[in-house]
Amino acid sequence: MQSDLPKVCHPIGGRPMVCAVADACLEAGCTRLVVVVGYKQELVREALADYGDRVEYAVQEEQLGTGHAVMSAADAFGERPSGDVFVLCGDGPLIRAETLRTVLKTHREAGASATLATSVIEDPAGYGRIVRDGSGRFTAIVEQKNATPEQLKIREVNPSYYCFEAGALFGALKKVGRNEKTGEYYITDVPSLLLEGGERVEVIEAVPPEDVLSINTTEQLAEVDRIFRSRSGAR
């Protein structure tokens, strides 16, 4: 991004992009927002200052992967976590409240421990792939760096829209091991662990391809900003 500013603080629609994610969560009916912060956390806190006590913070002291980031928020949910929780990325400002509502509806109607929203895109490079069995049921999320040549051909990807039953989430996170290639703990291991434990995992193709555009360059930032502004605040 040619900047020392945390990615989530770069502006989309005239505000830090993390604000768009917070807005979508609140519009979808979320009653708590727990934001995991770490590197240059003071800038992220400043970006979200207008939300006041609607935002709580959890600190990830070391950057040891997405699973470790979520585990850093465990204390915010107490010793016996319950209820449903979304796990989302702060750098996805094109997220829509309607997508979150669809995920939550599916999750609750199915009585699932985890529900993932996926997207089918033309160029899946860089994204985790959704692996299904012969009957079309979800079996795993495979990160690109760990995927086989055959799995790399899969165009259904994981844009990191998760809904979990909180107790199941934090219970499974305790079982996540370090990835052999990266040394990190992945949140993407959790759905498979839940399946292995006999829990129900639902997967729905609910995220429009446009909404999962990556923001890793200033050019991509400008494109997402253009799309965001064209929606006139609608999600």
Image (cartoon, rainbow, N blue to C red):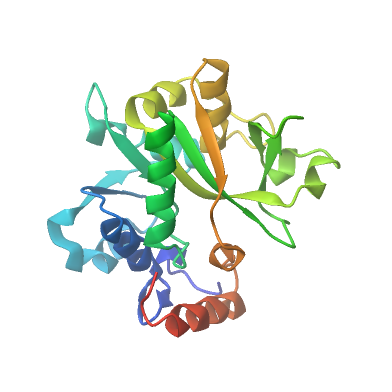
Depth check: give the residue in front, 130 or 98.
98
**Residue at (38% x, 44% y) in the render:** 104
Whether residue 73 is visible: no
Q: Is residue 81 left or right of residue 135?
A: left
Q: List the single residue furthest toward the left.
A: 53
The spot of residue 14 in percent (x, y) is 36, 82
Question: In x, y percent, where is residue 21?
Answer: 37, 61
The vertical placement of 6 against 158, above or below, is: below
The residue shown at (45%, 26%) is 173
Residue 201 shown left or right of residue 73 in the figure = right
Q: Residue furthest right?
A: 149
**Quarter location, residue 49:** bottom left
Q: Position of residue 54 (x, y in %)?
A: 17, 55
As rendered, which of 28 and 140 lies closer to the eye? 28
Pick out the residue farthest to the front.
109
Seen from the viewer's position, the closer of residues 4 and 234 is: 234
View extreme (top): residue: 197
Quadrant of the snapshot with the C terminus: bottom left
Eyeballing the image, is 110 above or below 208?
A: above
Q: Position of residue 152 (x, y in %)?
A: 79, 46
Which quarter shows the N terminus?
bottom right
Count of numbered labels shown in the rendering:
0
Residue shown at the point (48%, 80%) measured from the top left: 225
For this view, does 149 lie left or right of residue 93? right
Q: Is residue 52 above or below residue 136?
A: below
Q: Is residue 184 visible?
A: yes
